[in-house]
Amino acid sequence: MVRLTERQKEILGFIEEYVREYGVAPSIRDIAARFGIQVRAVADHLKALERKGYIERLPGRSRGIILKKSPNSIPLLGFIPAGKLTLTDEVFDEYLSIDPSLFGTGEIFALRVRGDSMVGDHIVDGDIVFIRRQDSVKNGEIAAVLVDGEVTLKRVYFKKGKIILQPSNPEMEPIEVDDAKILGVFVGLLRR
């Protein structure tokens, strides 16, 4: 990547720290307040960071700054329901500044949890779960699973030719299916 000025390094570092702490990018006004500079100057620095390949900007969004992938980052791909099976359309292309090697080997991605079906495993609405991409799991492991175009996070059991997707919330029933695609196995969690 292209070399940054000292101020661009400071702003990029602030954006990374802000995303780690709050789970969203700072607004232009947040950046201006942090460095005591004009909003226009921040906009110019962000344009330079985007041109140099360090960030991407989403037009029309006040916090529409996406950090580009670095060797020490994990993609946050969107939301995963931890409840009833539902189709999730909303996908972000954001990167968390977390070293993937913390979760072992393999390709790691992150998803933000929606729902409360996994509360018994201490996975609650709003948590970020880390998933190692693989197409199989051991009996009883927590996994991101695709069923008929719908995705969910559940414990997976194999029983007499059926796949049981087991929530860890006693108020919810297991889901029994003939076929499902394993997207990956749960390897970690981040709660803010």
Image: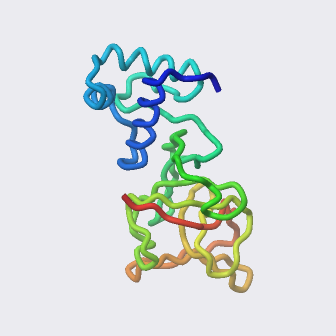
Q: Quadrant of the N terminus?
A: top right
At a point 46% along the width and 55% down the height, the residue shown is: 112
At a point 33% along the width and 31% down the height, the residue shown is: 27
Residue 73 spot, x, y in % from top left: 58, 46
Q: In the image, is 47 to the left or to the right of 146?
A: left
Q: Nearest the camera: 80 or 68?
A: 68
Q: Is residue 147 visible?
A: no
Q: Quadrant of residue 190?
A: bottom left
Q: Is residue 124 above or below residue 61?
A: below
Q: In the image, is 16 to the left or to the right of 29?
A: right
Residue extending farthest to the bottom is 160
Q: Quadrant of residue 132?
A: bottom right
Q: Quadrant of the C terminus?
A: bottom left
Residue 31 spot, x, y in % from top left: 33, 29
- Count of marks, rendered view: 0
Q: Nearest the camera: 118 or 104?
A: 104
Residue extending farthest to the front is 6
Residue 74 spot, x, y in % from top left: 58, 49
Q: Quadrant of residue 95?
A: top right
* Color encoding of the figure: rainbow
At a point 45% along the width and 36% down the height, the residue shown is: 13
Q: In the image, is 181 to the left or to the right of 44?
A: right
Q: Is residue 29 above or below residue 179?
A: above
At a point 41% along the width and 43% down the height, the residue shown is: 17
Residue 108 spot, x, y in % from top left: 64, 55
Q: Is residue 4 visible?
A: yes
